[in-house]
Image: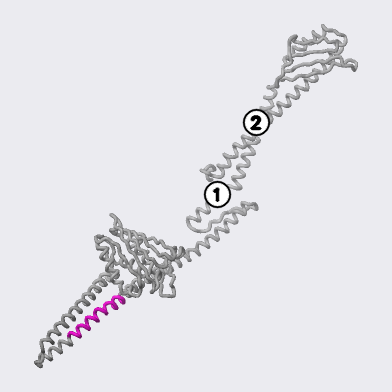
Amino acid sequence: MPNLFTKNSLVKRLFFISLPFTLLAGGLYAAAIIYIESKSLKETQLDQIKIQMSQLAEVLAIPTWNLDQPFIVSYLNQYSKDPRILCIELMSNANFPERSPPDCKHPESDQVEIFSEPIIHNGEYIGVVVATFAIHLDNQRLKFILLSRIPTALIALSCIFFVVFFIFRRWVVSPIESIMKSIEAFQADGQHHPVNWESSDEIGTLVETFNQAQIHQVEHDALLRSEKEKAERALINLKHAQTQLVENEKMASLGSLVAGISHEINTPLGVARTSASHVEEIANKLEQNFNAGTLTKNEMKQFLNSLNDGVHLMTANLIRASDLMHSFKQVSADQSYDEKRLFNLNEYLQETLYTLKPNLKRYKVAILLDCEEDVFIKSYPGAISQVFTNLIMNSLMHAYNENDNGQINIKIKNFKERIELTYFDDGAGMTEEVQKKVFDPFFTTKRGNGGTGLGMHIIYNIVSHKLQGSIEVKSTLGKGSEFNIILPKSIADT
């Protein structure tokens, strides 16, 4: 049997709440008994005094009629020896007042009562007798009454209290404890543990409802486990698909970069090839004239001028193509096989922007980079390049039309342990609803125009996880968007 008075138990509460009320009821009962019995004793005493006064008036009627003053004085003195009488006075129509004791007065107090009784002789009023009585309760009798009634009442109340207490313990607490044990067993093994209790009252209904609820809970938990396993498998597949989509998006971004660079390289290479063909052509002509012996000084001079122009043109365009290839090689290698290393942030961002020039030709948007030249960080350069590539391409796709004039500002602030990057475009901006969802996967406002909804999600994941930083967005519709990125200057090893 469990302890009845465990901490915060219902039985303990009932006991320590009911017991004071029981004692209070006993106290109120005792107070009521004292009040009632005191009042009863006082009324009894007053009735006795009234009878005495009536008898006194009858005794003094004849002496008063006969003006027998000695008898009256003697009788009043004898009567006043009663300790309850403080003062007794007789006044007759013959105008001779008598008092006993002689100099007594009738005091006014809550503890005294003044009684008067008319003196009647042969139906005629001949005087009045007035007496002041001190009211003293019979304490012995009152004590006897209290000692005989109050203990009996307290015993009766205690019996009622303990009977109610144990009935409550049996019919309310016991089934609740059984329910608690069933819940503990259910939490331990997840099986149904019925509570065996039958009654037609509310407790019986509660137990029956609990048993049914536990059966449903067991069935629900089994179904929930099954659905959870399905959901976990689906989540694994979804994460795999999402990872694959993210990788595809990264490769698509790199593919777009390759296409742009290829197109950009074709121009200097084409110019160099045309220059080479032109130089080859005038060299063949020079050789023919030399072999025929018709080569003149003027022709030789023209050849040398053309040769110098062609070689200069080829050299300039080949250098340009080489620079493009160098930037592309570094950026694409970092994005494909990114490794943590120490690098100059300003130079690397310049290379990133250089590789984006082919994509920027269709827009009238200027990109301004404000960064100190000696900012070195130990991080993942390819990840940083991808963040800014995606930000710029996202602005070009969503913030500007091809005919819009705009400006993108990238500002780098260098601190001791971190760098703060602010990216701001003055384009179309975003609504509050779009801002709340801008980093969600697969969210895009241009679903039918080539938007996958993964660009900003990739940025958020790269900044938050790979670069161990944070990113926030602020935007006003029609006034552009601002992205604030905070990155550590040295990535912690993970």
Whether 276 is among the magenta residues is yes
Vertical position of residue 178 compared to residue 235: above or below: above
**What is the chief secondary structure element of the magenta stretch?**
helix
Of the pair 424 and 15, the residue shown nearer to us: 424
| Quarter of the rendering containing residue 63 | top right
Describe residue 279's horizontal placement relative to residue 419 as left or right: left
Whether 211 is among the magenta residues is no
Residue 60 place in picture, x, y as percent: 84, 13
Residue 492 seen in the current view? no
Q: Residues within 10 Å of mark 1 (few under 14, many from 20)?
A: few
- Write the residue at 71% across / 27% down: 37
Vertical position of residue 291 compared to residue 472: above or below: below
- Write the residue at 53% across / 58% down: 192
Residue bearing mark 1:
177
Name which of mark 2 and mark 1 comes first in the sequence: 2
Residue 491 place in picture, x, y as percent: 29, 59
Magenta stretch? 258-279
Describe residue 143's horizontal placement relative to residue 232 as left or right: right
Residue 171 seen in the current view? yes
Quarter of the figure that contains the N terminus: top right
Give how far apart the Cα atoms at labels 2 and 1 are: 36 Å
Of the pair 351 and 29, the residue shown nearer to us: 351
| Quarter of the rendering containing residue 464 | bottom left
- Write the residue at 55% across / 61% down: 216
Furthest residue to the bottom?
A: 292
Residue bearing mark 2:
151
| Quarter of the rendering containing residue 396 | bottom left
Residue 420 place in picture, x, y as percent: 32, 59
Kind of residue at disc 1? Glu
Kind of residue at disc 2? Pro
Q: Secondary structure at mark 1?
A: helix
Residue 206 place in picture, x, y as percent: 60, 53
